Image (tube, helix red, strand yellow):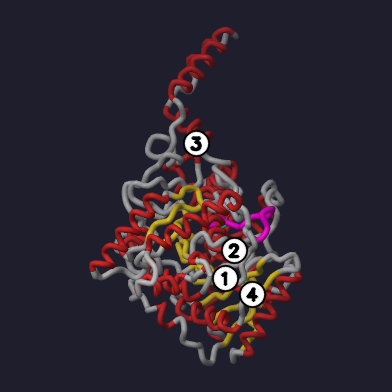
Amino acid sequence: MALYEKTATELVGLLASGQVTSEEVTKAYAERIKAVDGRVGAFLRVDVDAALAQARGIDERRKRGDKLGRLAGLPVAVKDLLCSHGELTTCASKMLETYRATYDSTVVAKLKAADAVLLGRTNMDEFAMGGSTENSAFQKTRNPWDLERTPGGSSGGAAACVAADEACLSIGTDTGGSIRQPAALCGVTGLKPTYGRVSRYGLVAFASSLDQAGPMARTAEDAALLLEVMAGHDPLDATSIDQPVPEYSKSVREPLKGLTLGLVREHFAAGLDGEVETAVREAVKTYESLGAKVKEVSFPHAKYGVAVYYIIAPCEASSNLARYDGVHYGRRTDEKQLAAELDAERKQLLAAGKKREAEQLDTSLVRLYRKSRAEGFGPEVKRRIMLGTYALSAGYYDAYYLKALKVRRLIRQDYDKAFEQCDLIVGPCTTAPAFKIGEKVDDPLAMYLVDLYTVSANLAGVGGISIPCGFSKAGLPIGLQLQGPPLAEDKLLRAAHMYQTATDWHTRRPKL
Ligand code: GLN
């Protein structure tokens, strides 16, 4: 077995016992990336020299007998919207194409403190808006299981690099499903923590009340290890939860006794692909054979999830993205060209005898903002800004935004009621396996409906995990979603691990 095929847990053991060096592991990934990423396109940037320098530094410290962090010497890939001091942090947007972060996000700072090797930055939908990674301004990422298909999104690069053995751990973010959905479509394990479990400081905001970073890995054990490093209270994020971080990496192996799973009646309705349904029902049987009880639960407001999400997320996005005007933040349009255009417009008006119009031409800063934003943002981001601005404007606020907030509360109550009857909720993660590149990109509604099973967890603020639970006849991975009450990451990981000890879906690899 090649080094790059090992799990993070295995590698941490091999590194700690000195059987392999971080330099060897980092080289193995660098070579793997060189061999396959031309086809997969998971990474926006990989700085092999910088990664090797970090690796050698850690190897030296280990030789000296220094005390090292939890991930010492292990390469980790990071989605390109978490600030890392001095590094480009583009959010896959032209708007931030040249933005170098001036500070570390807390997640990156924690990775550094754990002595991880920062391997590279992964591709995503622009500002995390999308479900296929096709909205990246820079490149397409392909699903390692079928290069004609998308890896899902928005953390498509983060999922694809793990599926393609280009990294064993990566960091994704999830606002409406962006960790779990690409994990499902690429056949890896991805966990969206409870809102507030992981600090959002330095995570470039999309929708602040929904955004959450989390681990992507091949196994629940590995995800537990990474979450343990990432999680925790942070005074720099007022929404982070002040609760101690359990030792997920230890508890993950403890089986759950007396587990009751809730099967959501509304999940098995029209729109669910037959092969996905079969795989999920099989997985539920596996849990039963492991001693779990299964109860049917109802989510009467689940059907409003997508509608509510696509009001609240764009509203928050339109506000968060106002800062990218080419002056405060973001790419500024070419000012010489802007002046020349203005001049040409003025001359044209004068030539047409429109002296007054020429005098009244907009020469303001607004013109600079408008052009900078028109050039810097892609079509989906513009669509979200328009949707959000509309829903927040006077006269519509009550009808859309306020109403959406009320339904959001009802969705949370559905969860509270369900968790009176069961420990975790089990169901499909996506309606269907990976779709073709180009298939939905021109149909925003079809793309939004992909988020049917994932947005509710974000709206309610609870945690969810997707784990591989089978393959379609065409050989595409299928994901099982488990969701838990607030701060039940420990249970989610244990239940996921329990399943992974009884099945081998998560060990299968695409042929690349
Ligand atoms: N697909 C959803 C969207 O486009 C979710 C994105 C995310 O979680 N970042 O908004």
**Would you name the residue on which mark 2 appears?**
181
Q: Position of residue 370 (x, y in %)?
A: 49, 32
Q: Amino acid at mark 4?
A: Cys
Q: Alpha carbon of mark 2 to alpha carbon of mark 3: how far?
A: 29 Å
**Would you name the residue on which mark 1 appears?**
466
Q: Main secondary structure of the magenta part?
A: loop
Q: Amino acid at mark 3?
A: Arg
Report the magenta residues as a range. Answer: 145-155
Q: What residue appears at the point 55 percent right and 50 percent down from the top-left corner?
A: 125
Q: Position of residue 105 (x, y in %)?
A: 36, 56
506, 101: nearer the viewer: 506
Q: Amino acid at mark 1?
A: Ser
Q: Nearer the viewer, mark 2 or mark 3?
A: 2
Vertical comparison of 506 with 115: above or below: below
Q: Position of residue 204 (x, y in %)?
A: 43, 52
Q: Is residue 80 left or right of residue 62?
A: right
Q: Mark 4: which secondary structure?
A: strand
- Of callouts 2 and 4, the N-terminal one: 2
Q: What residue appears at the point 39 percent right and 68 percent down from the top-left corner?
A: 20
